[in-house]
């Protein structure tokens, strides 16, 4: 069950994120730390997002965004096009 929670958390972060410039790394998706701190810590350790104790938000890494896109397709299939084309 933990793996599914991590996958759904990453997918939700991706779908509700906004893009922001992160010098010197370029544009990344950003979201608030409003989900389980334990799950966010695990995703951070896996290199899928970057979190800081000093910030109330997280950034999805390139690997995290790619993984999240795959998860959107896995869980939502064809209906994912409507969610990601806004």
Image: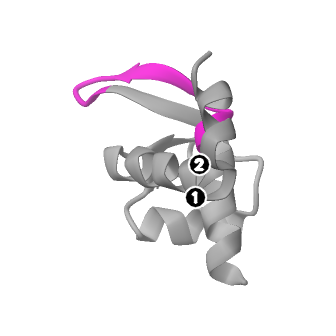
Instruction: Please tell me whether residue 86 is drawn above or below residue 25 in the rendered image.
Output: above
Picture residue at 68% right of the left edge, 60% below the top: 8
Label 2, residues with CA under 10 Å away: few <14, some 14-19, many ≥20: many
As helix, strand or loop, the secondary structure at mark 2 comes to: helix
User: Residue at position x 43%, y 55% from top?
Assistant: 67
Extreme-front residue of the structure: 78
Which percent across, then down, holds residue 11?
62, 50
- Quarter occupied by residue 10: bottom right
Q: Which residue is mark 1?
A: 74
The residue depicted at 54 percent of the width and 33 percent of the height is: 30
Q: Which mark is residue 35?
A: none
Left or right placement of residue 56 versus residue 34 in this view: left
Residue under the point 49% across and 22% down: 19
For the residues labelled 2 and 1, the Cα–Cα distance comes to 5 Å
Snapshot quadrant of residue 6: bottom right
Q: Position of residue 78 (x, y in %)?
A: 62, 41
Image spot of residue 43 (x, y percent): 52, 65
Q: Secondary structure at mark 1?
A: helix
Residue placed most toward the observer, 3 or 82: 82
Classify 71 as above or below 28: below
Displayed quadrant of residue 75: bottom right
Residue 72 tag number: 2
Q: Is residue 77 magenta?
A: no
The magenta segment is: 14-26
* Image-based side of 9 in relation to 29, left or right: right
Kindly give the residue lying farthest to the left in the view shown: 24
State how the image is colored: one colour
The reply, left or right, for residue 57 in relation to residue 37 is: left
Along the line of sight, which residue is nearer the eye, 74 or 51? 74
Q: Does residue 40 appear to the left or right of 62 in the view shown? A: right
Q: Which is more toward the observer, 81 or 39? A: 81
């Amino acid at each position: 069950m933990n793996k599914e929670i991590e996958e759904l958390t990453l997918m939700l972060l991706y779908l509700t994120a906004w893009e922001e410039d992160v010098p010197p790394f370029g544009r990344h998706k950003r979201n608030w730390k409003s989900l389980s701190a334990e799950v966010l810590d695990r995703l951070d350790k896996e290199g899928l997002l970057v979190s800081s104790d000093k910030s109330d938000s997280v950034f999805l890494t390139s690997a995290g965004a790619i993984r999240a896109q795959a998860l959107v397709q896995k869980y939502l299939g064809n209906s994912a096009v409507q969610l990601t084309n806004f």
